[in-house]
Image (tube, grey):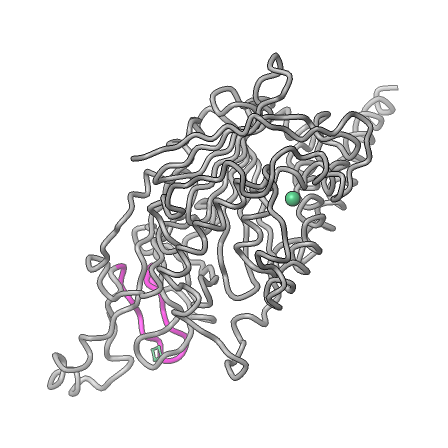
Amino acid sequence: MTSETLNSGKSLNLSSGSNVTSSSLSQGTNLKAGEHISKQPADQLSSGLLGWYAVRNSCGLKNEELYFFSMFNEPLVLYRDKNSRPRCIKDLCPHRGASFQGGQFNSGEIVCPYHGGRFSSEGNCTNLDRITCQHIIDSNYNNYAKKIHLYQYPCVEKDGYIYIYYTGKAKTNLNEFDLKESLDDSIPDSYGFRTSEYAYEEVYVDFKCDWARIIENHLDILHIFWIHGETIPDKDVNRQVITSFNQDITRDSRHIESKYNHKDKSKGEFITLKFIPPGRVLIYKGSPETARYIQVLDHIPLANNRARVIVRHYRKFLKNKFITKLFIFKLLQHRIFYKIFSEDYLVLKTQTFNQQMGYIKKDNIKLLGEDKMIQYYWDWYQNALNKDKPWELHQTNSQTNSVHFDTPMLYPPENPELAKNNERNIVIQILIRILVPIGIVMLII
Ligand code: FES
Ligand SMILES: [Fe+2]
């Protein structure tokens, strides 16, 4: 494993109370674009765009329920088999190509809605008599019927997540997959904190924009001061002042890490960001060893211009379940998350448009010194894209029936209903907390 450490020793030099604009940002920046950017090959990260992805939480995947989603345009289904083990299959019945939408379960086996074909945990058809006549099974079994198997991807449940090993080519026999990367290398516990020591809240968010742009957004420290300056409950993050920091970037075969230290050394680390390909970002408030809270963001490339993010917000404080319930902590946290992602959303959609129009290219934009993390990320992405070409594996075009993608997206900000429900619940819960004690007092009196 090779590694390099870069210390720009430079900082954003905006004084307290100054109004931050994009032009003042460039003026206040001491680095020239490209300065200190590594001479090392840009593709030091060994992982590409194919590999392990966290695609949902495991507690939400119930027995006898189908969870439909997609990866790089390929429709997939998650469910639990007879033994409650998670399975990830291509949403394609191997009999005559129906989707499993509308399918059911029978004794823990998934049943196709078209002819009732039923499939075992291993993906073999267990009731061939539903899809062909018995005499054909008897006479032709080796030629036809025994070849009916579900197409699957390796699927593992770990630390409250469901992970799949996505290659773009589902197989009928899971033993045929050549797992090039260990899942253990990408789980949060291998990146400096024990998840078991933290409590967490979790939200899902859906975006109609480019997947890679969302990751860029989460690796971009500067935007939080402006766009989220009035939403993030942190005194160091506000619109008036950008915290002055030094930046250290490390990268090796498994991740890119950027540490932002307060220029005032007595204050220590401000934030640490890690990018773990293909789709995970960790944001530590402070140093990884002592962070009071840590965000784990998993980015799922559903389809062209469609992406889902799982956001977990781990914290070392307020771990008592009763207290968090009493203070409706979960709902309040969700409100902040929904607001933060809504703030980013318009930018991400319009930036996606600009990208697809070919406007975002080297000559038109300037990456500044503080954008080194972003530069490294795009270096990785470009290399990974050239190597894996994931968007070419399941291409769609204007003729493609868009049945899978016309369905409304499930989560905010694309589907604001959930955020509104959350708001409503907050009001109801607050009223209950006020009215119940008043009622009790009145009864006593
Ligand atoms: S298409 Fe699924 S059983 Fe026929
Ligand atoms: Fe943001």
- The N terminus lies in which quarter of the figure? top left
Up/down of 421 relative to 97, above or below: above
Q: Taking 405 as reference, is 179 left or right?
A: left
Taking 125 as reference, is 418 above or below it? above
- Ligand 2's image quarter is top right
Q: Give residue 211's position: percent from left, percent from top.
A: 53, 56
Q: Determine the residue positioned at 38% across, 41% down.
A: 40
Which quarter of the figure is the C terminus placed in?
Answer: top right
The percent coordinates of residue 55 (x first, y second) are: 45, 51
* Helix, strand or loop: magenta stretch: loop
- Is residue 107 magenta-colored? yes
Number of marks in the image? 0
Can I make out residue 208 in this image?
no
361 to 254, vertically: above or below: below
Q: Nearer the viewer, residue 348 or 189?
A: 348
Q: Which residues are magenta?
A: 106-121
Which one is nearer the viewer's eye here, 281 or 248? 248
Looking at the image, which residue is at 62% across and 66% down?
Answer: 408
374 part of magenta stretch = no
Q: Is residue 320 above or below residue 127?
A: above
Determine the image quadrant of residue 254.
Answer: top left
